[in-house]
Image (cartoon, rainbow, N blue to C red):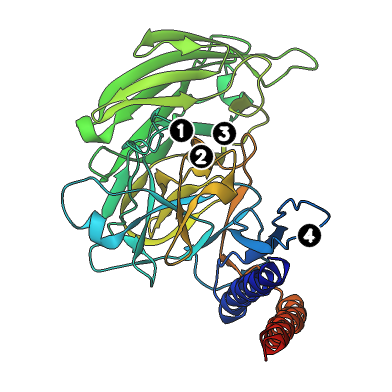
Amino acid sequence: MTISSSLNAGISGLSANSTRLASISDNIANSSTYGYKRVETDFHSMVISGSGGSYSAGGVRATSQRLIDERGPLVSTSNATDLAVRGRGMLPVAAYSDVVSGDGGQTMMLSTTGSFRTDKDGYLTSESGLVLLGWPALADGTIPSYPRDTSDGLAPVQLKVNRVTAEPTTSIAVSLNLPATDTKSTSGGDMQSVSIEYFDNTGMSQNLSMQMTPTVPASGTSNEWTMVLRDGASGNAIVGEYVMTFDDTRGAGGTLASVSTVSGGAYDPATGSLIANVAGGPIEISIGGPGLEGGLSQLSDTFAPISIEKDGFPVGTMTSVEVDANGMVRAFFDNGATRTIFQIPLVDLPNPNGMIALDNQTYMPSPESGSFFMWNAGDGPTGEVVSYAREESSTDVASELTSMIRTQRAYSSNAKVIQTVDEMLQETTNIKR
């Protein structure tokens, strides 16, 4: 019994070291595979209780585990949609065949890196046929509330490369100086005007005219102006009229003291803005106010438009797309507009090493990994998304070669045990002779 147990132990040793050599071979073969997670093989002794002072060899058992939570170094690339995860968390992906099947039931898989490029349909797809998944944004660029513990809200990230967009103007900030001398009794009362370009709902360029006429008193100085807003898209119709009074006290001279509304949207002194209802919709115009910086002023004898800042863009075509550290996929247009079109969440699990390993460095949650949860990149336990980067293999070739030498020696030693047991059994057989 003892001799035969020695033979079984030697055989189990050969089998265990063969398993370790297989994992070492896999690790070395994938030492240049982006996103590869190395496999670690451990040995566990098997003890068989003997009786009567005899000892029976139990042998050894090998178990292997893929270290999915072990990260490789990040390397820079030149592609904006080469993505990697710095820290905890994984990218949701799906097989291309599932996406194009048309049933909308793609199975979510997880990966820590990928080189994604647009295919003929605009899907961000890797060379291995994985499509990046994310949460679609609304038309205004905001991300609605999606479920975090299920993949139901995820959709394939699809870029409409030939897409055109326009963004209407919704706010204008005006900073200019009105001549204080024009409100004196000796002034001619000349009107000062400035034309402001804005973009309507169809991306067309329109003009909003600000006409400012001083109030000329019979004597002294009035420090008062009447501002009339005319909308070019409405046939130069008046969309607002306001009476502005400027301060002339020491320390506050030249600042806007008060605004009274004659017609149009009401002026808000807290924000220094008013609403002009042009043909394409309301536009908030900031002109300043008491205690506020910028806006309109009345100083000296010079009319000086200082700056006009506004949002909105004319029609433009998508030129590029990038993913920021928070997983926001932003499209850039040749008109200067930027629009958020998707958000890539990072998926986290209690035990990443318990996931099921699949081809192409992808993994699926399992009962051993625990339930997954989708985080905004950079929130909670997750790291951040890194663009222009890929994660290298976590294999350390030098360590694997060292382990290979040890495994080879251990295999040879177990083979020697089997050879020795064979010789002992031969000697036992020879006793009968």
Distance Cα–Cα, label 3 vs label 4: 95 Å
Q: Earlier in the sequence, mark 3 or mark 4?
A: 4
Image spot of residue 205 (x, y percent):
29, 45
Element class at badge 1: strand
Q: Depth check: 268 or 302 in front? A: 268
Distance Cα–Cα, label 4 vs label 1: 90 Å
- Indicate the quadrant containing the C terminus: top left, top right, bottom left or bottom right: bottom right
Mark 2 nearby-residue class (10 Å; few <14, some 14–19, many ≥20):
some
Q: Mark 2 is on which residue type?
A: Ile
Image spot of residue 68 (x, y percent):
59, 56
Q: Depth check: 295 or 414 in front? A: 414
Distance Cα–Cα, label 1 vs label 3: 10 Å
Element class at badge 4: loop
The residue carrying mark 3 is 175
Element class at badge 2: strand
Residue drawn at (21%, 45%) of the image: 104
Left or right: 129 as drawn, with respect to 233: right
Residue drawn at (64%, 76%) of the image: 14
Left or right: 236 as drawn, with respect to 90: left
Compared with residue 186, is residue 390 higher up or lower down, i.e. above or below?
below
Q: Earlier in the sequence, mark 4 or mark 1?
A: 4
The residue carrying mark 2 is 308
Q: Mark 4 is on which residue type?
A: Tyr
The residue carrying mark 1 is 172
- Indicate the quadrant containing the N terminus: top left, top right, bottom left or bottom right: bottom right
Mark 1 nearby-residue class (10 Å; few <14, some 14–19, many ≥20):
many
Closer to the camera: disc 2 or disc 1?
1
Q: Earlier in the sequence, mark 2 or mark 1?
A: 1
As drawn, which residue projects farthest toward the right? 53
The residue carrying mark 4 is 55
